[in-house]
Every structure is written in C-alpha cells, then in structure tokens.
Amino acid sequence: AEIAANPQQFPILNPVQYANAYNYLETIKQQILASGKIKYANEFAWKLYIIQDDNTLNAFCTPGGYIYVYTGLIKYLENASSLAGVIGHEMAHADLRHSTQQLTTQYGVSVLLDLLLGKNEALIGQIAANLGLLAYSREHEKAADASSVEYLCPTSYRADGAADFFQKLNNESGQSVPAFLSTHPNPDNRVQNIQAIKADLGCSSSPEPQIEINGYNAFKASLP
C-alpha cells in the first residue's frame, strides 16, 4: 500500500491500460508457481506490478510475494527466459524468507513488531523505499539463483535464463553494475553456477524462437 501511494518513486503502470503486458508477466509467474517448487505458492499473494522507469535495471519481491519489475530491466533483456529467470530469482528471495530475514537484520524484531501494531508508521515509507535495494548475502543470492533454475526447469523457459542478465553485463564492459549487485557474487561466477545447476538437474527446455524472442519483443513494444 505504501508503494502504491508513492507514484513519484514507484510509477506503477495501470493493469487495465496495459493488460497485455500484465498478462505476459502472469504467464511467466503461473508457470513458476506450477513448478511445484514454491513452498508458499498458496500462502503468498504473488501479485505482479510493472514500474515505469527505463533507467533502472531492477526487480524485487517483497515479503508475502508482491513482485515489482522495472521497465528498464524488461527493455534491457532480450528474451522471455531471461526475464523468467530474474522473476524466479526474486520470487525465491520471498519464498525462502530472505526478504523477511534482511528486514529483521536491518531494522530489528522490535521495530517490525511496532509497525505491525500500528506504531512508528513513518518508518513504513522508508522501508518501502528501500525494498528494491535490500543487500542480500552471498549465500542468499546463490540460493535464489539455484532456486530460479529449479523453478524454470519444468517450464517452457530455459532453466538458466537468470544467467543471461549477468552475461550481458559482462559483455558490456562499460555498463555500470546496478547498485543492487554491488555486494553480490561475481557475475562470472553466477553465470557458471547457474549453468552448472541446470546441467546437474538435466534441464533441457528449448523455447520456440517465436515465443522466446518474437513474443518478448512484442511484449516490450506494448510498454510505454
């Protein structure tokens, strides 16, 4: 609710006006939820929102499964599996309770309990503003990468889709690394680890180019 009430920082695209774009993301989300690997598949909300900000390469998922994807990230990526991999990664942070653990570490149990009791409400805005910048530990990042592969393995997307983002960053040596990657494992290592997990699991999906690339380009074209 705090994010929705702050359109200047979080300009969320209208789900009715951009129904096709939201339906595209829903298809990705539903395939991930149908993988059978999400522990809180039925308990969490798993609602999707698109934030109109072409300058931000980011996505995040709050505790309880509210997923936010920036148009900058969508337009930076080149195919459906790449985006599915990132969404799976962010959903893993929520499903593995990484988001909750990081908030507890950052603010303390007593502060969070006060918020639940309606105290110190001014802090809610600060927490909401920083949700996209939570500094997960290297262990959390590795676990989310691995979970992304597991989530996508039984889907129509490439299981190593999450590696594409890091590979593209590596290929563009002049590209500054987004702030949310500053404390994360080295992108080279992440690409190798993700691909190794895919091989270990024997994932073999090869999406049709019509869906993987053409469909993704149409999705990007539907955005403002």
Image (cartoon, helix red, strand yellow):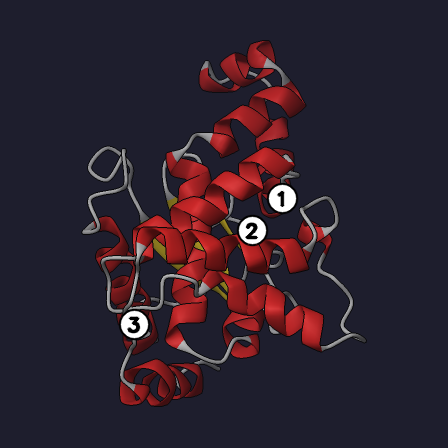
Name the image quarter holding residue 112.
top right
Q: How many other residues sit within 10 Å of disc 2, few (<14), some (14-19) or many (≥20)?
A: some
Instruction: Read off the residue under disc 1.
Output: 129
* Inter-mark Cα distance, 3 to 1: 26 Å
| Residue type at the position of mark 3 | Tyr
Inspect the image, locate mark 2, and give the three-letter code of the amino acid beneath it.
Asn
Q: SS for tag 2?
A: loop
Can you identify the residue that label 3 sits on?
24
Q: Mark 1 or 2, which is nearer the eye?
A: 1
CA separation in Å, label 3 and label 2 = 25 Å
> Residue tagged by mark 2?
6
Q: Quadrant of residue 169?
A: bottom right
Q: Residue at x 44, y 30 (%)?
A: 97
The kind of secondary structure element at disc 3 is helix
Above or below, 47 against 188 in this view is above
Residue 215 in the image: above or below residue 168: below
Residue at the right extreme of this rendering: 174
* Residue 130 in view (yes/no): yes
Q: Nearer the viewer, mark 3 or mark 1?
A: 3
The image position of residue 160, as x and y in percent, is 43, 62
Q: Which mark is residue 218?
A: none
Amino acid identity at mark 1: Ala
